[in-house]
Image (cartoon, helix red, strand yellow):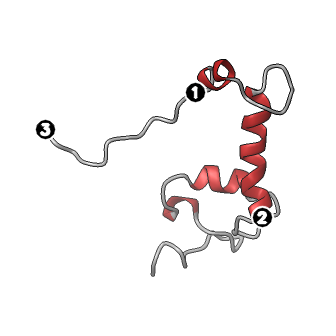
Amino acid sequence: MTASTRTATDGSPATNCWPPRAKDFRKLDTDGNNLLSFDEWAVSTDNKFKAADANGDGALTRTEFAATKQKTKKPTCKCK
């Protein structure tokens, strides 16, 4: 059985089988259908933009943009 076909006792996907970021996915999936619509995905971006737009003018200045947290990437290799 693959991770995508395992289910919990309530019929929802088993959380211990989900790929990384399952918690983030469930948080965005507001209707609980295990699919992300454009609107569900976009609301996260919209919220981040609004939080960064300190003066509320609908545009980010370089200063406002610089104040946003840059996403850090985890290394993909386990080199020594």
For the residues marked 2 and 1, what is the alpha-carbon distance in whole angstroms? 28 Å
Image mark count: 3
Secondary structure beneath label 3: loop
Please tell me which residue lies in front, 13 or 44.
44
Image coordinates of residue 54 in percent, x first then y, are 79, 20
Which residue: 45% across, 81% down? 1
Q: Residues within 10 Å of mark 1 (few under 14, many from 20)?
A: few
Q: Residues within 10 Å of mark 2 (few under 14, many from 20)?
A: few
Vertical order, 24 against 34 (above or below): above
Which residue: 78% across, 31% down? 59
Left or right: residue 50 versus residue 67 is right
Image coordinates of residue 52 in percent, x first then y, are 73, 27
Secondary structure beneath label 1: loop
What residue would you read off at disc 3? 80
Number of the front mark, 2 or 3: 3
Number of the front mark, 1 or 3: 1
The part of the image, by quadrant, that contains residue 60 is: top right
Please tell me which residue lies in front, 65 or 46.
65
Q: Are marks 1 and 3 in contact (CB under 8 Å)?
A: no
First in sequence, mark 1 or 3: give its number.
Answer: 1
What residue would you read off at disc 1? 69
Secondary structure beneath label 2: loop
Which residue: 71% across, 70% down? 10
Vertical order, 52 against 44 (above or below): above
Q: Amino acid at mark 2?
A: Gly
Query: Could you say which disc has been placed on residue 32 in the image?
Result: 2
Left or right: residue 61 versus residue 19 is right
Q: Amino acid at mark 3?
A: Lys
Please tell me which residue lies in front, 7 or 65.
65
